[in-house]
Image: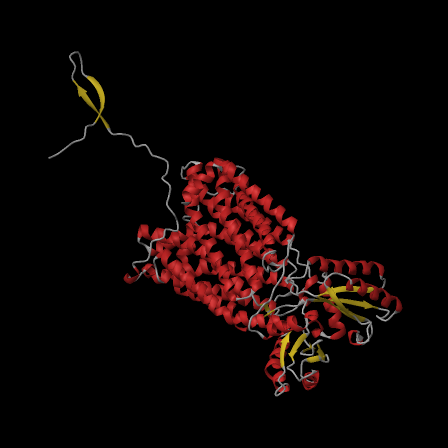
Amino acid sequence: MLGRLARSCYRHRRVVVLVWLVALVGVTLVSNRLGDDYRQSFHLAGTDSQAATDLLDQRFQARSGSTADVVFAADAGVHDPAVEQGMTSLFATIGGIDHVVAVRGPYTPDGALQVSPDGRISFAEVQFDQPENLLPSRSVHAVAAAVDQARATTSGVQIELGGGLFANREPPSSSEMIGLLAAVAILLIAFGSLLAMGLPILTAMFGLGVGLASVSVLSHVMSVPDFTTQLAAMIGIGVGIDYALFIVTRYRQGLHDGFGPEEAVVTAIDTAGRAVLFAGCTVVISLGGMLLMGVSFIRGLAIGAAVVVAITMVTSVTLLPAVLGFVGHNIDRLSIPGLRHNAESGRRGFWFSWSRFLQSHPWSSAIAAFLLLLALAVPALSIRLGSSDEGNAPTTETTRRAYDLKAEAFGAGADAPLLLAADLPPGTTTASLEPLAAVLSTTPGVAYVSPPQANAAGDAAIMEVVPTTSSQSAATVELIHTLRNQVIPQATAGTGVSVHVGGMTAVFDDLAEQLQSRLPVFIGAVLALSFLLLLVVFRSVLVPLKAVIMNLLSISAAYGVVVAVFQWGWFGGLFGVGKTGPVEAFLPMMMFAILFGLSMDYEVFLLSRIKEEYDRTGDNTTAVADGLSLTARVITAAAAIMITVFGSFIFGDLRVIKEFGLGLAVAIFIDATIVRMLLVPATMELLGKANWWLPSWLGWLPHINIEGHEVPGPPVTTPVPVEFVPVPDSAAEVETERPREPVTTG
């Protein structure tokens, strides 16, 4: 089927290119017309924070929406007449914006607690009537515009906006450009030709453009986090260039083997294209597995990333064959002197010699690689999942400056309040909560407790608890557990009052616990799927088992590096990490899903060539050396592209994107060096022919040819044997040529 698809795309290349151009322009126009509607919805069924949220939605609708802060500082003091006049006018303007139901500022009878002890810093809380995922962006923009106007007209006052609603989530275009420029350099080295280098870049950009525009449209129909585009761009650029690299490499090899352009395209798609589809579908399936985690915003994140990968994969097997049809024999035109390589240049080169060296010292090589991976993975044992706060944002962001002002004036926990929602049964009042308030005020880790406030019906009440530590601190998480398990049950025993701990800090803690509890099941399912797929493809038990163990070791090592940098602070300054904190709760799951597919790509590409050589020669040692030498160049180039693309995102502003960039880059580096250069040759030498052992009772497994079927090469004309037979003539003997007649016997 792939061969027919490739031939059709080649022969109708103008139509194919036109269709992709129309798709790119059309989806982009729709996306620009609609805009985006990125949002994060944290519906965590069965958790205490969700119970608090549901109670607020039902009985405190005015307090169930999102909140934001207007934080301001004045050297003359917040009660200076000019300052007070300007800020009061600002609060009145904000109060008139759609979906703003209240502005609780310092210039009200109960606003004294919102002023710092030195009278220089204060804040107002802006209450919206909708949660963040439902709040129209125009209301948020209107608040920001009002603040901008106040900054211009109120002198001597620093005004900042706090809260996730006003965090800057623009994609780090500089990071993408760094990754693309690095990919260009690597492709030039790999191909030695400007034209061959440009094809993977072109294909990846088409797929990425259509994919990201599709994700923007998708944000209008489901909850998609605002950083999905950055994560999808990171993955899309990497896989798009890699997939095209494999196909273009096979196409060039076909031309060098004597195929015409059409047959070379068909061969490339029917061989390397199969590996691309196998790897791409694996990534999509593993990302889709995250739908089972039961968290709405992760569902949007997974679907958004999967859409980009799927579109990029389809681009590689449809648009690329069409473009190759225009290129034809000119693929090696515009060559760079000294960088041209033929298809067989690595057969007896460095990689062959390196493999032979490792095979001469298999035990020491395997043990050294194994110990190195274990050492890198050790920090992962202390991983703490959670969510970082705005204190990790760059100081160029207004939300970071607002965070710093509040922390300076009211302590680190001022930006991480816990909202206690109480269900008051008939016959009870807020007086039943006074013992709880008294205990809370003396609980270690609590900086402030607000008096209970009842709703209009008197059947519910809320209390605000401000911790002494920030939202991402382990002490704050411990405080939440102490309140839920000890303080609240003891203080409300016998009253019939039910109190739930909510607020975004509690929501993120519950999210981390829910994901951490399901992570082993998810990882186990992915590893089982990996084992079964490789078992069927290579008809071997030990090859897939070895691959699963190596994948687990490499991802654990990547986790360890992320923990060391972001949680422990090692080399934090080098990577622009402002302060230590927990690892984002969904990062281990996302990393595993992405890396599973990417490592499967390299695994299949390498092992299929080794298996091909083994089936041909029956010599395991030579097969490993030949397979490694014949695939190392393209795998190294593909991995280098991935590393630079992922690594470039380390220089972005968002902490979560930094974590993804570093984790993915480290994992690919480990996979391409320690695993491919050390463990694979050494362990396959130790296992010998056992690598390809399959029990007889598994003989029913289907045969899957992941490398496809070679298209017959150019016909070779063999001369027909002839002989000269003397034929007598009356005048003279004339030498006559005639074909030899077949000899029959019997």
Taking the image as shown, residue 603 lies to the left or right of residue 66, namely: left
Image coordinates for residue 500, horizontal then vertical, percent: 62, 77
Q: Quadrant of residue 119?
A: bottom right
In the image, is residue 139 above or below residue 209?
below
Image coordinates for residue 476, horizontal then vertical, percent: 64, 76
Q: Name the outermost residue toward the left.
A: 746
In the image, is residue 453 above or below residue 233?
below
Position of the N terminus, as image quadrant, is top left
In the image, is residue 234 above or below residue 117?
above
Is residue 360 something one can see in this rendering? no
In the image, is residue 303 above or below residue 53?
above
Q: Quadrant of residue 136?
A: bottom right
Image coordinates for residue 407, horizontal then vertical, percent: 73, 72
Identified at 31% across, 51% down, the residue is 617
Taking the image as shown, residue 137 lies to the left or right of residue 266, namely: right
Taking the image as shown, residue 328 lies to the left or right of residue 150, namely: left
Q: Name the outermost residue toward the top.
A: 731
Q: Name the outermost residue toward the right.
A: 81
- Which of 736 and 248 lies nearest the eye of the viewer? 248
Image coordinates for residue 641, horizontal then vertical, percent: 54, 52
Position of the C terminus, as image quadrant, is top left
Identified at 66% across, 58% down, the residue is 169
